[in-house]
Image (spheres, rainbow, N blue to C red):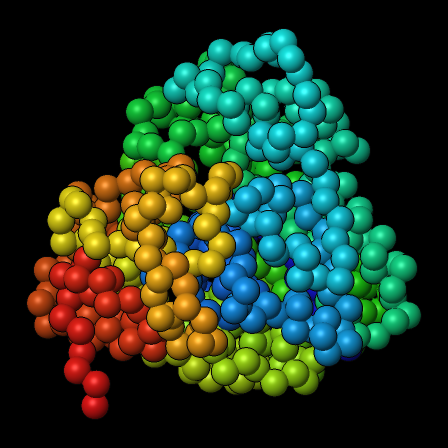
Amino acid sequence: MKAIILMFDSLNRHMIPPYGDAVTKAPAFERLSRQAVTFDKAYAGSLPCMPARRELHTGRLNFLHRSWSPLEPFDDSMPEILKKNGIHAHLVTDHYHYFENGGATYHTRYNDWEFVRGQEGDPWKGSVEDPFIPPVVNGRDNCLWRQDWVNRPFMQGLDKHPQKLTVDLGLDFIDQNKDSDGWLLQIEAFDPHEPFFVPEDFDKLYEDDWRGPHFDWPNYAEVSESPEAIKHLVLKYRALVSMCDWSLSRVLDKMDELGLWDDTMLIVNTDHGFLLGEHDWWAKCRMPFWEEISHIPLFIHDPRCPGADGQRRGALVQTIDIAATILSYFGIPLPKDMEGKDLLPVIREDMKIHDAVLFGIHGGHVNVTDGHHVYMRAPKDSGNSPLYNYTLMPMHMREVFSLEELHGMKAHPGFSFTKDCQVWQVPSHGIPELEFDAHSFGNLLYDIDKDPRQEHPLDDPVLEDHMIDLMLDLMEQDDAPAEQYERLGLARKAKE
């Protein structure tokens, strides 16, 4: 038995054909929907990038306890569990966050890994003198922006694009190991994450009459650009999705060529979506996680259920279920701390495995959906406190915790999933690089069956109480820290 995960970052569900989009040119996704199960109610859990990958490894939520972080010593890592059970786990990626402080313990859980450099401002190429930086919308001028322009001359053309090189390496692994059994390959593309840097052949797929300044990287902020600029950026994103579609076609072709469909699970997924002007916002993190961000695409071909290919499933599922599904597929018992569920019953017969799921970012709204409604609970005041990080790995996205943070830390007895380890409790303000004010948006309740664009918040105290009950049950299951209830203005349920 073999398994392939093809993971794209920031892939918008509502902008690919299997989920109703008629503009993005993505025939391989349409082909995939005929060769796999398409999940209609898949949700993100812990956001953004590395929190999502932590739950891909551990099969449990982490955003209530920790911001962006490495894997912790007490975490159960799905690739490492495979490795210890004789299943070879290989990672190929151009996702450079794996190789920063806040992602430093992920790639080493695999047997081996390969890394393609250059995406987004990866500190790759060196230039002492300032490179030419073209005029930019929003005046973006930070070090990440400068580094991106240092890197770009070395990535021009399809054959030098990191996405293409990443998939090349994945296909090489498949060719080399096609006759072997017992392996997991994770091909992880940074695209279509911003900046929307895409070879010209894919740009030409869309008629774009933009004549303004260079603009392929929006700020994480409210939209202030013209309708013409918004249209241009949406087309840049679509062009990059079309490139992702081409990469997907290469994997599907390889599975056809080598006859892998009979013994190889294929999972195509993402970590979250990305706002492109919807709700008058760009990006993610600084605003509530509306459907465009939280409701994600997911496709699985399970060779044990060939009759399910081409069908759709409406059961509520989540990123935390992927680790459990892969371990079960290889016949490996699940760790007791894993919250995710094996998706096999959903694939076979659309069996319900979750009544509701939580999702969110550390320090932001805590959100719950039952698949029909979404409730977003904001911090009770602008102070957004109390809030703590619980960790043995004091690292943020790009730097270690500051001395000021460490001076405020104290020992904490730990949680049900820390395996009798004490942890450090460190005062937190969320993710330092992504400051946001969740309180200003207030609590929000939506009927996503009737209002999928979430344009009309509900005022329904009875329904709100029901959603709060679901939220409290899931927070209890996750062993949420006591202060999270206080921060949200929620009364903790009495244990029965």
- Which of these two is toward me, 264 or 180? 180
Is residue 144 visible to the viewer in this orientation of the structure? Answer: yes
Residue 244 image position (x, y, % from top left): 64, 45
Residue that extends furthest to the bottom in the rendered view of this protein = 496
Total marks placed? 0
Quarter of the image that includes the N terminus: bottom right
- Which of these two is toward me, 78 or 421? 421
Classify residue 151 as left or right of residue 493.
right
Q: Check the image and report above or below for 448 versus 428.
A: below
Write the residue at 54% across / 40% down.
193
Write the residue at 48% across / 42% down.
400
Q: Check the image and report above or below for 51 versus 342.
A: above
- Which of these two is toward me, 185 or 230? 185
Residue 300 image position (x, y, % from top left): 61, 69
Q: Check the image and report above or below for 186 versus 190.
A: below
Q: Check the image and report above or below for 240 versus 384.
A: above
Classify residue 360 as left or right of residue 464.
right
Quarter of the image that includes the C terminus: bottom left
Is residue 265 visible to the viewer in this orientation of the structure? Answer: no
The quarter of the picture where residue 417 lies is: bottom left
Residue 450 image position (x, y, % from top left): 26, 62
The quarter of the picture where residue 229 lies is: top left
Write the residue at 21% across / 85% down.
495
Write the residue at 68% across / 48% down.
93
Residue 154 image position (x, y, % from top left): 73, 24
